[in-house]
């Protein structure tokens, strides 16, 4: 992937207009340019949209209007979108419809951009605008478009293909379907209409959604886990309710799950993968039949794969193009000894226990996960990674894990994964560096060899303007908190030794200066939102002091102004945060 230098993007920023994805300013009565945008009469919906996007953004760059026409019968210079007869004369072959790779090249004055009709051509158009004209779609709210007096096209020869087949950037900011399409994200947990479509994964932790205890347990307790000699659908430990699981050796459980998965496919045919997986707890069934399979396979995953394979075999007979997914997670993470997933089974492997301070290959605390992943990669026709890149206990607290993002994605790719979901702050805005991290992850999932330093610098100066150098200074300071001896997991506490008062105070000083030099109110708001994790951390470490020096008021003003609804995945609500700070002595 090509990126213009951070110095150049900073200079461009000074004369750049910031735009929302609003094309109402487009003036179709503008003077037509010499170039035409040529679409095939049989262009797909995404190719048609991509041509309109190309027309719009080139107009925003230069004020020049390039008409779009549906045939190649034009003698002047043209930009040809999608594979057409005119491209076949260049000696290139038509790509498969679902081929996401693309290329753009020049022949004389003509420019050709094409790939697969579903998404490839569309991705080619956005890469052309990004690489050759410096267009940036940083967030759903912030687009940066450099200005030129007129359009000047050069000679091009560029090809690209996805490094990861299914790319799911699980940030709240990344859920916007237009932003996702512009940044080449094609994976979703839930189905949403997106240009070019998505590869959707239906649900997770589906045992009880498919077989609710309220429907079955009273009449058929044998369908649920046997725990300590008793059939149960939940375990109560220290007044805390934990779900149990299903008895997977029960033939009626297999019949019901299979029937209901088929029903889900009929009701929701747009998904690629349909899930049959454990509840988000432990408490597997201990009955003799279940445990006989577990002992034979020397892993609880043996029972799970044995069961899911049977569901997948039945589904394949009616729906040969669909996949059945399951989890290798917590008690099922260890791969089975002998049994292998069927060809239409997708194993979704979760490194929830991993150290996120250091990459998977370099940290001794990640050795067991790496061993398990390599074994799953050997036996699985499709491996899908469910990764974690945020502190779920404190979404908006500093979390210095940028150094492992690229290396871990490369490791996942080496182990034959077809998809990666990077789960993050997904319930609302406000996650620590969520805009930057969502943008960087999108680049890495498309191209794991992306120069991350260039992407980060580009974002710093393009998104934050004159404040970018100071935000980069804070970014570098935060990442330096990680040492070879410092291990962290997905839960990091404000009182952990990684944080010090010196770090907090230095960070506050940096943000104070960054706010002062902000180019305008919009950028000032972005800087303040980026400072929120430091304000939050200070409030958590010194609630009384944060009240008296105004830090708490700053944090609450930002939270309310930005519409932030979640400070954590579950427990740390805004009201609890307010109570914690306001009642501290």
Image: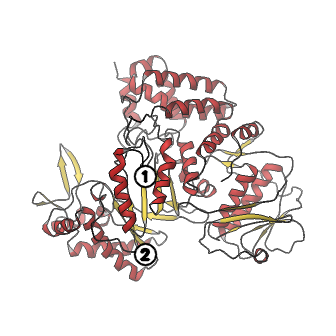
Pick whichever, 288 or 44, lies toward us: 288
Task: Name the spot of residue 82 as percent of width and height, x first.
Answer: 72, 70
Label at residue 467: none
Q: Find numbered disc 1 in the image and state the secondary structure of the residue it sits on.
A: strand
Left or right, 45 with respect to 531, comes to right
Task: Name the spot of residue 91 as percent of width and height, x first.
Answer: 75, 76
**Foreground disc of the pair 1, 2:** 1
| Quadrant in which the C terminus is drawn | top left
**Residue beneath label 2, please?**
266
Left or right, 584 with respect to 105, comes to left
Task: Name the spot of residue 421 as percent of width and height, x first.
Answer: 46, 55
Left or right, 498 with respect to 22, comes to left
| Res 355 quadrant in image | top left
Q: In the rendered view, how is the structure colored? A: secondary structure
**Residue beneath label 1, please?**
387
Pick whichever, 165 or 257, lies toward us: 165
Work out how far the residue at label 1 is from the one at label 2, CA to CA, in angstroms: 30 Å
Residue at x-position 26% and y-position 74%: 254
Task: Name the spot of residue 242 as percent of width and height, x first.
Answer: 23, 51
């Amino acid at each position: 992937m090509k990126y213009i230098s951070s110095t150049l993007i900073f200079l461009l920023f000074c004369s750049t207009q910031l735009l929302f994805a609003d094309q109402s300013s487009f003036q179709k009565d503008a003077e037509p340019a010499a170039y035409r945008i040529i679409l095939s009469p049989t262009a797909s919906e995404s190719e048609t949209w991509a041509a309109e996007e190309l027309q719009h953004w080139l107009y925003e760059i230069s004020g020049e209007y390039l008409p779009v026409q549906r045939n190649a019968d034009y003698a002047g210079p043209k930009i040809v979108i999608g594979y057409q007869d005119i491209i076949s004369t260049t000696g290139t072959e038509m790509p498969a419809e679902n081929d996401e790779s693309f290329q753009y090249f020049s022949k004389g004055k003509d420019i050709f951009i094409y790939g697969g009709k579903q998404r490839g051509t569309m991705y080619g158009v956005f890469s052309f605008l990004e690489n050759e004209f410096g267009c940036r779609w940083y967030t759903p709210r912030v687009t940066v478009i450099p200005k030129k007096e007129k359009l000047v096209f050069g000679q091009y020869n560029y090809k690209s293909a996805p490094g990861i087949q299914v790319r799911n950037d699980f940030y709240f900011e990344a859920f916007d379907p237009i932003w996702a399409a512009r940044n080449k994200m094609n994976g979703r947990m839930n189905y949403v209409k997106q240009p070019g479509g998505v590869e959707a994964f239906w649900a997770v932790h589906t045992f009880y959604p498919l077989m609710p205890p309220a429907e079955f347990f009273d009449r058929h307790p044998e369908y649920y886990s046997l725990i300590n000699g008793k059939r149960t659908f939940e375990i109560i430990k220290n007044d805390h309710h934990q779900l149990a699981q299903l008895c997977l050796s029960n033939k009626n459980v297999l019949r019901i799950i299979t029937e209901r998965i088929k029903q889900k496919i009929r009701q929701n045919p747009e998904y690629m993968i349909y899930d049959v997986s454990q509840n988000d707890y432990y408490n597997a069934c201990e009955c003799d039949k279940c445990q006989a399979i577990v002992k034979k396979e020397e892993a609880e995953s043996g029972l799970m794969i044995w069961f899911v394979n049977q569901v997948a075999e039945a589904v394949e007979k009616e729906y040969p193009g669909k996949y059945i997914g399951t989890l290798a997670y917590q008690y099922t993470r260890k791969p089975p000894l002998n049994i292998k997933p069927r060809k239409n089974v997708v194993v979704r492997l979760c490194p929830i226990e991993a150290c996120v301070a250091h990459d998977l290959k370099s940290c001794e605390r990640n050795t067991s996960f790496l061993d398990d992943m390599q074994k799953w990669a050997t036996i699985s026709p499709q491996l899908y990674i469910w990764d974690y890149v945020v502190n779920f206990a404190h979404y908006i607290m500093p979390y210095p894990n940028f150094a492992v993002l690229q290396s871990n994605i490369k490791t996942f790719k080496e182990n034959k994964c077809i998809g990666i979901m990077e789960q993050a702050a997904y319930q609302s805005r406000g996650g620590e560096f969520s805009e930057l991290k969502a943008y960087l992850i999108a680049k890495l999932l498309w191209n794991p060899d992306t120069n991350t330093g260039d992407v980060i610098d580009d974002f710093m100066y393009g998104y934050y303007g004159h404040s970018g150098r100071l935000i980069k200074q804070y970014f570098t300071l935060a990442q330096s908190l990680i040492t070879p001896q410092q291990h962290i997991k997905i839960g990091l506490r404000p009182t952990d030794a990684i944080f010090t008062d010196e770090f907090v105070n230095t960070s506050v000083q940096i943000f104070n200066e960054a706010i002062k030099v902000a180019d305008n109110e919009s950028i000032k708001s972005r800087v303040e939102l980026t400072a929120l994790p430091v304000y939050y951390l200070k409030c958590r470490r010194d609630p009384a002091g944060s009240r008296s020096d105004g830090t708490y008021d700053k944090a609450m003003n930002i939270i309310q102004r930005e519409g932030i609804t979640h400070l954590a995945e579950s427990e740390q609500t805004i009201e609890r945060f307010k109570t914690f700070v306001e009642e501290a002595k």
